[in-house]
């Protein structure tokens, strides 16, 4: 079994402007908040940092603006051990920003892509060699879809395992799906991609099976506090119940899960082991404020002693 997995992330980099308030304002209303935090985020960067903290060798392909957020986010990636040599600075376009409201135990997010919209297929082509060296290529949907399609196609042609977190939700071409080995949607993303509302065990199974029918090897659906379900084309399937933990902030929980699956599969672990590990990583990630700053290290995961699990 490999000891240091090699993961390449092609994706978004945002500064998260996180506001804590008692409740969200209604349209046209002003409410007082308690705190604001500037925390590195973006689904791609979150997954890169999470994988690096779990011990992977990680390189990230992405774009930032030539501004203070761009410099801070690049420094944060480097400080977390992510190879940032493949990041491109875009002139005249601001770094991506996510405005995140934390209220009543949940979050709502508005993402302004900024420089992420300038992450193009040629940026992936320029770093072809990183993908050739990778065990796993990890993708999300916060950069242009042409770039995701290009990266998936290149990675597949290089014989790499391609993992797609289809977030934020959108329709995807059959051609892209055919290049994906493992897809990791949440329930609403699964509903959009399959056209089936997974509101019962049977419907969840039908929805996941419909993605397998499009040529994907494995589907893992994250179920929030309830854990995750997985299913493969060769007949493996299972569910992993979530852990009961003290939730501080769920932002980035899905990102931590995706990164943990990527690391485990890159190390040659089974899908069942990867899902179980990712479930622990995500449980730890929600106990801290902020996306990237809440990502646990491998040591923290090995010391994790959960008290309870949700009933299945
Ligand atoms: O998945 C969480 C991320 O989504 C946040 O960090 C925010 O930047 C948005 O992209």
Image: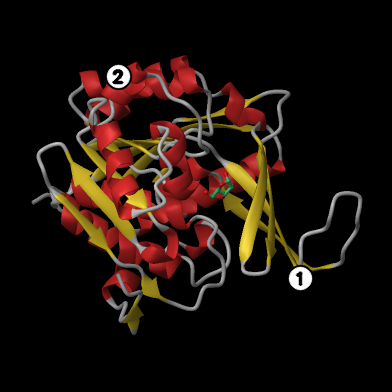
Q: Position of residue 209 (x, y in %)?
A: 25, 37
The yes-or-no answer for disc 1 within 8 Å of ligand 1 is no
Would residue 42 appear left or right of 108 to someone viewing this image?
left
- Of all residues, the one furthest to the bottom in this rendering is 307
> Within 8 Å: ligand 1 and the Cβ of disc 2?
no
Relative image position of residue 140 (x, y in whole percent): 44, 36
Q: Residue at x 82, y 58 (%)?
A: 25
Give whichever of 22, 149 is nearer the camera: 22
Left or right placement of residue 238 versus residue 229 in this view:
left
Mark 1, residues whose alpha carbon is within 10 Å: few (<14), some, or many (≥20)?
Answer: some
| Residue drawn at (56%, 40%) of the image | 13
Q: Is residue 129 visible?
A: no
Is 264 placed left or right of 223 in the picture?
Answer: left
| SS of the residue under disc 2 | helix
Residue sitting at x 91%, y 50%: 28
Q: CA distance from mark 1 to mark 2?
A: 46 Å
Q: Is residue 199 visible?
A: yes
Q: Which mark, residue 154? A: 2
Dot 2 surroundings within 10 Å: few (below 14), some, or many (20 or more)?
many
Q: Nearer the viewer, mark 1 or mark 2?
A: 1
Look at mark 1 in the image and give the residue it sits on.
22
Query: Residue 270, percent across and down?
Result: 13, 51
């Amino acid at each position: 079994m490999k000891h240091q997995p090699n993961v390449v992330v092609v994706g978004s980099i945002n500064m998260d402007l996180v506001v804590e308030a008692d409740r969200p304002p209604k349209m046209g209303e002003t409410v007082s908040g308690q705190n604001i935090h500037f925390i590195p985020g973006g689904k791609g960067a979150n997954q890169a940092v999470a994988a690096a903290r779990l011990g992977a060798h990680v390189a990230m392909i992405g774009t930032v603006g030539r501004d203070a957020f761009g410099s801070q986010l690049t420094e944060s990636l480097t400080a977390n051990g992510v190879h940032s040599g493949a990041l491109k600075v875009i002139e005249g376009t601001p770094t991506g920003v996510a405005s995140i409201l934390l209220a009543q135990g949940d979050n709502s997010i508005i993402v302004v892509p900024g420089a992420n919209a300038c992450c193009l297929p040629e940026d992936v082509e320029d770093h072809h060699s990183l993908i050739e060296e990778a065990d796993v290529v990890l993708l999300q949907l916060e950069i242009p879809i042409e770039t995701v399609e290009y990266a998936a196609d290149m990675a597949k042609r290089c014989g790499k395992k391609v993992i797609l977190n289809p977030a934020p939700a959108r329709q995807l071409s059959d051609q892209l799906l055919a290049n994906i080995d493992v897809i990791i949607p949440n329930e609403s993303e699964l509903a959009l991609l399959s056209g089936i509302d997974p509101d019962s065990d049977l419907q969840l199974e039908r929805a996941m099976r419909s993605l397998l029918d499009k040529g994907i090897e494995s589907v893992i659906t994250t179920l929030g506090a309830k854990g995750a379900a997985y299913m493969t084309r060769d007949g493996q399937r299972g569910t992993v119940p979530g852990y009961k933990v003290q939730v501080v902030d769920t932002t980035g929980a899905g990102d931590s899960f995706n990164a943990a699956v990527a690391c485990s599969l890159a190390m040659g672990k089974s899908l069942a082991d990867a899902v179980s590990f990712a479930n622990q990583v995500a449980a730890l990630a929600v106990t801290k404020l902020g996306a990237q700053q809440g990502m646990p290290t491998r040591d923290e995961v090995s010391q994790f002693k959960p008290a309870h699990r949700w009933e299945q």
